[in-house]
Image (cartoon, grey):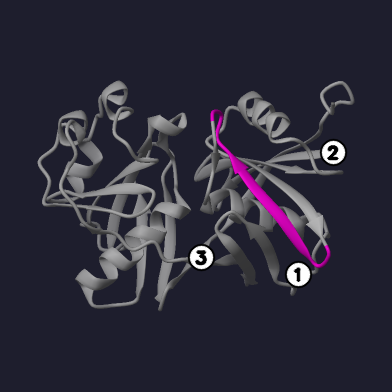
Amino acid sequence: MQLLTVDAFATRPFTGNPAAVCLLDVDRPAEWMQALAREMNLSETAFLLPDASDWRLRWFTPTIEVDLCGHATLASAHVLWETGRLHDTATARFETRSGRLEAVRDGDDIVMNFPAEAPSAAAAPDGLLEALGVEAVAVARNRMDYLVELADEPAVRAVQPDFARLGTVDARGVIVTASASDGSHDFVSRFFAPRAGVNEDPVTGSAHCCLTPYWARKFGRTELRGYQASARGGTVGVRLDGDRVHLRGRAVTVLRCEISEAASG
């Protein structure tokens, strides 16, 4: 089995968000996938299995299987085209725990079609703002995450969470966000998910499924440009299309290897 590491939402190596992509030979038990994800120790490891003309796709953090992951889907589509498993002009179609997801190539970009995960206003649960060490402009929540809007971009960049305390919040993760001040982006964000085994994710596609409808309503525009202000950083182009979100980015392969026979089970 081939295993590749791909930097997603990146135009050069060692930026964006690294994901491992495993091209399965046969279906494997979830326990084996979880063990490999733990071995890779990246925020997500994606597992691809051909299924007729589509691909079955699952995502694992080092500790759990997740319902939706943008950057590992971007990495998976990139791998299918790069290895010739899909023709350059073909649409990558994935069957996932969040339904069917699709990706197409647009020049050097990859554009993914994801469900919008719009948040609704919510009260901050006990300990959330204290764990972040912030004062919130607004708090909202969707089915997966809390979103906390802060006053400005410097406030987002300055957040230093208490991860142990943040891990007690009952949610997959927490998005902090504010309007951008650099002129080249509309909003900035960071994403923390210690409960899922990822203290801070470098660039989070699924978080932008929440951020897109949130900021589209505030700006009165459906097409926006977000920057995730992690240490690695990455830009995500987004477009709201009804109950779907189109996420745009690039990817770079960093590592190609094979899983040893001993580890194949």
How busy is the neighbourhood of tag 2: few (under 14 within 10 Å), some, or many (20 plus)? few
Residue labelled with disc 1: 88
Magenta stretch containing residue 58, yes or no?
Answer: yes
In this rendering, the answer to whether 9 lies above or below 199 is below
* Residue lying at the far right of the rendered structure: 261
Residue type at the position of mark 2: Met
Magenta stretch containing residue 24, yes or no?
Answer: no
Residue type at the position of mark 3: Phe
Q: Which residue is depicted at the point 23% across and 77% down?
A: 220
Tell me whether the residue at label 1 lies in contact with that at label 2, contact meaning CB atoms closer than 8 angstroms: no
Which residues fall within the magenta stretch? 52-63
Residue type at the position of mark 1: Asp
Q: CA distance from mark 2 to mark 3?
A: 28 Å
Describe residue 63's horizontal placement relative to residue 219 as left or right: right
- SS type, badge 1: loop
Q: Quadrant of residue 22?
A: top right
Measured as percent of width and height from the top left, residue 71 is found at: 54, 50
Q: Quadrant of residue 100?
A: bottom right
Measured as percent of width and height from the top left, residue 17 is found at: 51, 43
Q: Quadrant of residue 85?
A: bottom right
- Where's the C terminus, which quadrant? top right
Describe residue 104's horizontal placement relative to residue 264 as left or right: left
Q: Which residue is depicted at the point 29% across and 53% down?
A: 188
Describe residue 43's horizontal placement relative to residue 190 as left or right: right
Res 1 label:
2
Q: Is residue 10 visible?
A: no
Residue labelled with disc 3: 114
